[in-house]
């Protein structure tokens, strides 16, 4: 793909974004509905093309996990459509008056949410990102440039073309949704240079991908790094609840960013709880690695090294540490954690409050599974990821998080004196 | 300055930030009051040290503008104190519940504003940034690391020591406010590497400084780039108001980021207005540069080149262009502008609305001087600058803009199914 083509796409998106800025809510929601309709009408083609890409991926010796991520079946397809419909039902993230003020001279000033402009999404194989990202961007009045993985290119292109048709039928600009149609790294490299036209990049994938993008561009990047998530079982925790929360946080799905990676157990309840936890984790085929004190209580488990505390396993492995009180737990989390999702199990309001205030993470869970952190349970509808940044957006990235604002001042010849 | 020392400062700030996160509003406001008190008590020392630094700067042949920026007189000093007191009176930017939701299973979720953490401010000579930045950071519960220009080092250090004394007297952590005390570029280089400890950097100064910092660090940077500000005089503008707004926008102060740089005049009123504008600008010693059509009406002025439309003069020069209607004006602004502050003079509500919606700038002024864009007239109290970024903060950067948020979920053993 030539520079020219990526540049043309970026310029077209910029122009589309200018038009989108004044498209009313009703039209954006109509577009989302039409996008779901046109997708529905190409369902069989999509499943057929996806099946071919699955065969190709298998032939090329891709891992089962990768093939699974690539696969769209009937259920996945319906889920993708339902997300588009759901995002249409959310409140309008645009034109909210966020603050306002009349200055002493009578100047009316307000701060109003507006689209960011052009959003580039660079992602790996999951084709559902294609529809999720387009849905969230259109809802928030942004133009979107999609760039999926090569292994799903045909599937993603077909999905995008259907969405473009639906969006244009509803009256949106032709280039509100675009996809880069040629494989290869070169096109991504060109995309990273388009800082004159693209307002933000959102990479979805492994840490390596995100780092490469963040360090290779002047375009602001919303980053989705590790989830080294912790659960601290306080001395007063209800034992049954503690075990259930630890198991759910770790085992409900191990390959996701809000899965538990390190369990912190208060030394006052460790003797009672660790054997119960050991049995429960063994029943779920989770390998435990423990600190020295944990090993004293559970003689069969290997030692956790310094590296373990820094590791996002994304695998059936859990590191376990005995800590001396809540402050030690908070200090461990703030030192080793990644600021993604961290929880406490306690019956004490004071400890819950201390944990809430002092743990410096995007999500703080009180007596709730770390797996509940995310757009769905937070009521955001569809999201394009979970940000580990602190600036602009922290945690789930939904339509509202893809807005910025402008200040508007209405005067009557007001001058500065 | 050794790496070690900058690193120690950054680590101390990080620890202070953890403590500051749970300091209540009343204590932060008390600290701001005590900071103003201790500053008042060292006023004579500050003015004396500042006087020495002014002599040194003159001896070294620094420009008058630079010496002026460096100077603290009695009035400036009182203004600095008044800003600290004013920021104390603002509503608390922390612990605001920004959104909330109970999920179908009864999980209570809310999104709460919290401090960013550690903020590094790198600035050039104005010593008032020292007190303004510290005030805004303490108000918002952030630890601050100050790094002013070498030419004001003694003044800045004295101001900072007084503020630290006040803050500590009120009960804030010792390292809530810090300043890097040694001159030279090396220390700034070390500061840029402290991405493990510093959450955001705010450079205040010329474009070169900001670019060097943004490109030399992994720490997120809030950028304050150019203000290539426009005023569009629509065909229906009240002529007197139009001239007054153009003059005030350009002449009230020429060296500031929200001063007018390009005037767009609708071709329908150009013949009537340009002679009036020409006379008024001449009386204010402003040099006009015009497009071809402008030159036809004002034969005495030189041509504006393509470069002129891209230029932030920060000087008594103004480029003037005749445009064919509001859409041409908006297109010119979105193409050549820097997204800082752009205004329209019109009597038409429809045109005001179109301008508000389509101009992609941090501040859009309707019948108001571009010079009114800023924290003061927007009711934000003290600010540390005007962001030209779109992410996180756009326009004035006050205490609220130096917060992020966390999601907090209160459950009762809630699991993911």
Image (cartoon, coloured by chain):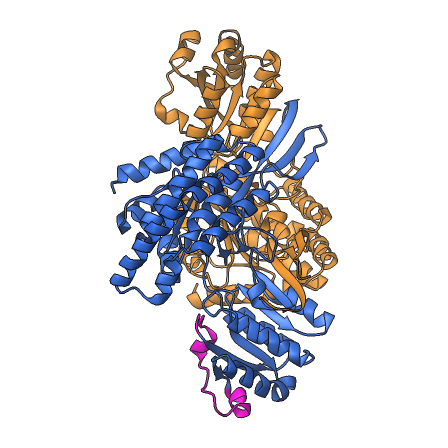
Chain colours: A blue, B orange
Q: How many marks?
A: 0
Q: Quadrant location of residue B141?
A: bottom right
Of A83 and A247, which appears nearest the observer? A83
Q: Is residue A147 visible?
A: no
Give whichever of B237, B108 is nearer the camera: B108
Above/below status of B367 relative to B104: above
A220 vs B283, left or right, is left
The segment highlighted magenta reads: A292-315
For image coordinates 41% across by 57% down, the residue present is B189
Residue B378 pos. (x, y %): 65, 36
The residue at 42%/65% (across/down) is B3
Instruction: Give the residue displayed 63% in from the left and 72% down from the top.
Output: A344
* Residue B262 relative to residue B173: left or right: left
Q: Residue furthest front?
A: A44
Residue A91 part of the magenta segment: no
| Residue A272 rendering spot, x and y as whole percentages | 63, 88
Q: Which of the 4 quarters of the picture holds residue A109?
A: top right
The x and y percentages for residue B171 are: 70, 64
Closest to the observer, B82 or A67: A67
Is residue A313 within the magenta segment? yes
């Amino acid at each position: 793909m030539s520079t020219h083509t990526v540049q043309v796409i970026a310029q077209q998106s910029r122009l589309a974004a200018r038009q989108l800025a004044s498209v009313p809510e009703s039209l954006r929601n109509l577009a989302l509905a039409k996008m779901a309709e046109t997708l529905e009408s190409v369902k069989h083609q999509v499943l057929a093309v996806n099946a071919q890409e699955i065969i190709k991926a298998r032939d090329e010796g891709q891992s089962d996990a990768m093939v699974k991520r690539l696969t769209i079946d009937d259920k996945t397809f319906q889920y993708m459509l339902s997300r588009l419909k759901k995002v249409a039902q959310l409140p309008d993230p645009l034109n909210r008056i966020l603050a306002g003020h009349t200055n002493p001279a009578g100047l009316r000033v307000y701060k109003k949410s507006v689209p960011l402009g052009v959003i580039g999404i660079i992602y790996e194989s999951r084709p559902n990102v294609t529809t999720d990202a387009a849905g969230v961007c259109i809802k928030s009045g942004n133009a979107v440039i999609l760039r999926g993985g090569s292994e799903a290119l045909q599937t993603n292109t077909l999905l995008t073309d259907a969405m473009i048709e639906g969006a244009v039928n509803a009256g949106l600009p032709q280039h509100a949704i675009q996809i880069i149609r040629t494989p290869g790294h070169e096109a991504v490299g060109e995309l990273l240079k388009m800082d004159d036209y693209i307002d933000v990049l959102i990479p979805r994938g492994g840490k390596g991908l995100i780092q490469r993008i963040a360090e290779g561009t002047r375009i602001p990047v919303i980053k989705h790094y590790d989830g080294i998530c912790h659960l601290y079982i306080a001395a007063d925790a209800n034992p049954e609840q503690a075990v259930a929360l630890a198991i759910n946080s770790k085992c409900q799905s191990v390959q996701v960013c809000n899965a538990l990676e390190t369990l912190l157990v208060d030394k006052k309840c460790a003797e009672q709880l660790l054997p119960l936890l050991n049995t429960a984790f063994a029943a779920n085929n989770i390998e435990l690695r423990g600190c020295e004190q944990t090993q004293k209580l559970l003689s069969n488990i290997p030692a956790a090294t310094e590296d373990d505390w820094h590791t996002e396993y994304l695998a059936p492995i859990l590191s376990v540490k005995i800590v001396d009180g809540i402050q030690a737990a908070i200090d461990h989390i703030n030192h080793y954690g990644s600021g993604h999702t961290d929880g406490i199990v306690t019956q004490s309001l004071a400890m819950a409050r201390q944990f809430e205030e002092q743990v410096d993470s995007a999500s703080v869970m009180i007596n709730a599974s770390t797996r509940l952190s995310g757009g769905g349970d937070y009521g955001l509808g569809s999201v394009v990821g979970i940000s580990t940044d602190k600036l602009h957006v922290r945690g789930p990235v939904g339509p509202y998080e893809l807005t910025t604002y402008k200040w508007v001042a209405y005067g009557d010849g007001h001058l500065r004196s």
